[in-house]
Amino acid sequence: MRQQFTKQKKCVRRRLCWTFFPTIRDSRHLAYIIMASNKRTVRVFFSSPFRGMEREREMLSAVYWPKISHSCADKGLTFVPIDFRWGITEESSMAASTVSICLDQVRDSDIFIGFFGARYGWHGLHEKNLQASIQKAIQDHPWLEDYRDRSVTEFEFLEGRLRHERSERPAAMFFRNSHYDNEMFERLKTSDPAEAKVFTSEYDGQTAKKLLYNLKLEVRNFAEKLPESSAYFFTKDYDTPEEGAKLMFDAVMEILEDQFLKSDQMRNFTKLDYWIEAQKAYIDTGHSIGDIFLGRETETGTRRVN
């Protein structure tokens, strides 16, 4: 059952309206529906700063991704979660490819899911590695020139949907309320001060809090201005990592049921088809597996993307 939320609860939903057959708005919409109904691999990009958001990602990977994968497999679909928790390889970083890889993966995804806590993520005009990576990515993403001071995660939000009002890519963006982060900080500040800081905006510098606040406003305004006929877009605040992970699961399942799991074509799968799609899924997830974290913070000799 779909929940309805009010604006007072800081939730806005924009989705495609479906009856027995999808409502066709224009040729672009029709093309996307045909593509979705024939697609056998569904790529869902999960975007967030890593530190401070581990619990949501653990819940997603341990509890909800298997459920999504099972629902997809029943209809002949392969579910591919794109998750950069393992960072970007050292080779890619040395080639200043971090931002390009992230944005290319977002661009190639079918569904975008983003979530933030107190942290804003890796950013800064004085971060040499980041600026070098942005400079290289500008070749394919020239809009980055106006966002050099923003975080990698905000880049992903922008490419995932915020820059594309007419995009047919479904998206959902979530923000964790501050009381959870405040509670974690108070709990850890004495026993583990370094870990406590990942639940504060100050972890990412003095400008992080304002930049994150501005991004939240942009998401709210984007949702408010979307026409009713626009593709699925959903944003909501949540209180705990468990609630957030469940909201993300519900959003993905609603999108899948509306756009990917209704076609009878999904049931006509041979064993060879399954094998081919499994190989494609393996290749798709390759970019999200790296043995070295890269980014601004140093921990036990490794570095993280954000």
Image: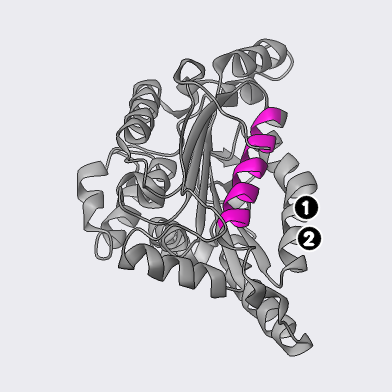
Answer whether residue 256 is magenta in the image. Answer: yes
Q: The residue under label 1 is which amino acid type? A: Lys
Asked whether the residues under the numbered discs 1 and 2 touch, taking CB atoms below 8 Å apart as contact, a structural biologist would say yes
Mark number displayed over residue 246: none
Tell me the residue that label 1 is attached to: 67
Q: Quadrant of the N terminus?
A: top right
Q: Is residue 215 above or below residue 68?
A: above
- SS assignment at label 1: helix
**Location of residue 71 in the rendering, given as x and y in whole percent from the top left corner:** 75, 59
Q: Is residue 178 above or below residue 65?
A: above
Tell me the residue that label 2 is attached to: 70
Query: Which residue is rendered at x = 78% and y = 86% of the image?
Result: 271
Q: In this view, which residue lies farthest toward the front?
A: 20
* Mark 2 Cα-neighbour bin, 10 Å: few <14, some 14–19, many ≥20: some
Query: Which residue is rendered at x = 55% and y = 16% of the image?
Result: 178
> What range is drawn magenta here?
243-258
Q: Is residue 290 visible?
A: no
